[in-house]
Image (cartoon, grey):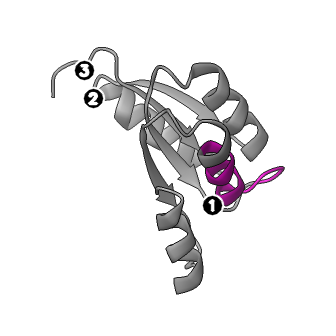
Amino acid sequence: MGKKPGKLILIADDALPLRVMLGEVLAGAGYEVLTAGDGVETWELINSRFSELDLVVLDLLMPKMSGLEVLSRLQQELPHKKFMVLILSGIFKSDKEILKLKELGA
């Protein structure tokens, strides 16, 4: 796989081994990678680097602020910025919650 200049991915998950593994795989594929271990750190990185982001890999269950809260804030505070959000969760969510995620743009 060749270099993909300008492609910035944020991996937001409270599980350090998962952040490290995904980060190494994506960096090895030529992407620039940022990582965050909780929802507040995730929001701060999104807010400070939103114009550069291409993808956010977002865990739903994180400390300090959930992935759903981060997604809601994105919709409310940065509706003009469009980048992909990929939801990642080790816990199955209900159909109602999945519908809410889709409504928020995930």
Q: Is residue 80 magenta?
A: no
Kind of residue indicated by mark 1: Leu
Q: Quadrant of the N terminus?
A: top left
In the depicted structure, whether residue 99 falls above or below residue 35: below
Residue on which disc 2 sits: 29
Residues at marks 2 and 1, CA–CA distance in whole angstroms = 25 Å
Residues tagged 2 and 3 counted as in contact (Cβ below 8 A): yes
Residue on which disc 3 sits: 4
Kind of residue indicated by mark 2: Ala
Look at the numbered disc 3 and give the secondary structure of its residue: loop
In the depicted structure, whether residue 99 falls above or below residue 30: below
Q: Residue furthest left?
A: 1
State left or right for residue 15 relative to residue 40. Answer: left
Residue 16: x and y in percent read: 64, 44
- Which residues are drawn in magenta? 63-74
Residue on which disc 1 sits: 60
- Label 2 or label 1, whichever lies nearer to me, is 1
Kind of residue indicated by mark 3: Lys
Q: In terms of depth relative to the viewer, which is nearer, 78 or 67?
A: 78
Quadrant of the image occupied by residue 12: top right
The secondary structure that dominates the magenta segment is: helix
